[in-house]
Image (tube, rainbow, N blue to C red):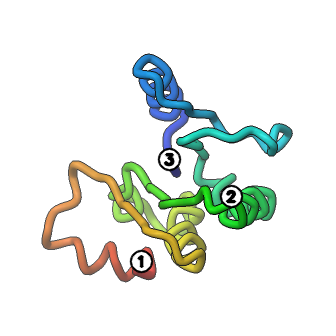
């Protein structure tokens, strides 16, 4: 799950553990760790190290989907602010796995613009 906010990442991690879902926060120094949910920040999600980790998961048949949370933020910012958000959609789509985009604030009138930016 790609998370744009560190505080949200910590909160999701805690909530998963409370209800018994195995969940880890991505750490490139601990690439061997596995869990049902892997939380990763935008900048790390498009890195070579994380791509290698995803390759491993795909090879083991353990990568079911990629979730991008708070995806509306790509529309709330200029292209030069956190450009990784714009890259993440295209990079993950290349994997050929199901993509899930989560937001509570993307209006229907902005969906086409969102899809264009995310290369969906």
Placement of 108 over or under 102, stated as above or below: below
Cα distance in 3D space between marks 2 and 1: 27 Å
Q: Which residue is mark 3?
A: 4
Q: Quadrant of the C terminus?
A: bottom left
Of marks 2 and 3, which one's residue comes earlier in the chain?
A: 3
Residue 55 found in image quarter: bottom right
Most extreme residue toward the right is 29
Circles 2, 1 touching at the beta carbon (< 8 Å): no
Q: Residue at x 45, y 30 (%)?
A: 12
Residue 57: give its label.
2
Q: Residue at x 82, y 38 (%)?
A: 30
Task: Categorize mark 2 by other alpha carbons within 10 Å: few (<14), some (14-19), many (20+).
Answer: some
Task: Categorize mark 3 by other alpha carbons within 10 Å: few (<14), some (14-19), many (20+).
Answer: many
Most extreme residue toward the left is 108
* Mark 2, secondary structure of its residue: helix
Residue 74 picture location, percent across and down: 41, 62
Q: Residue at x 50, y 71 (%)?
A: 97
> With 64 as the anchor, is 38 left or right in this view?
right
Residue 19 picture location, percent across and down: 40, 21
Placement of 59 over or under 67, stated as above or below: below
Circles 2, 3 touching at the beta carbon (< 8 Å): no
Residue 61 found in image quarter: bottom right
Cα distance in 3D space between marks 2 and 3: 22 Å
* Mark 1, secondary structure of its residue: helix
Of badges 2 and 3, the one in the foreground is 2
Of marks 2 and 1, which one's residue comes earlier in the chain?
A: 2
Residue 91 picture location, percent across and down: 60, 73
Residue 117: give its label.
1
């Amino acid at each position: 799950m790609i998370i744009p906010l560190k505080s949200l990442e910590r909160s999701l991690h805690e909530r998963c553990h409370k209800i018994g879902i195995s969940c880890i926060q991505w750490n490139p120094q601990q690439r061997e760790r596995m869990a049902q949910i892997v939380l990763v920040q935008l900048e790390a999600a498009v890195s070579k190290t994380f791509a290698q980790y995803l390759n491993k998961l795909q090879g083991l048949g353990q990568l079911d989907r990629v979730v991008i949370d708070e995806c509306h933020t790509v529309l709330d910012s200029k292209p030069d602010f956190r450009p990784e958000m714009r890259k993440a959609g295209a990079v993950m789509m290349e994997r050929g796995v199901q993509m899930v985009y989560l937001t509570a604030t993307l209006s229907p009138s902005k969906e086409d613009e969102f899809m264009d930016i995310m290369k969906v």
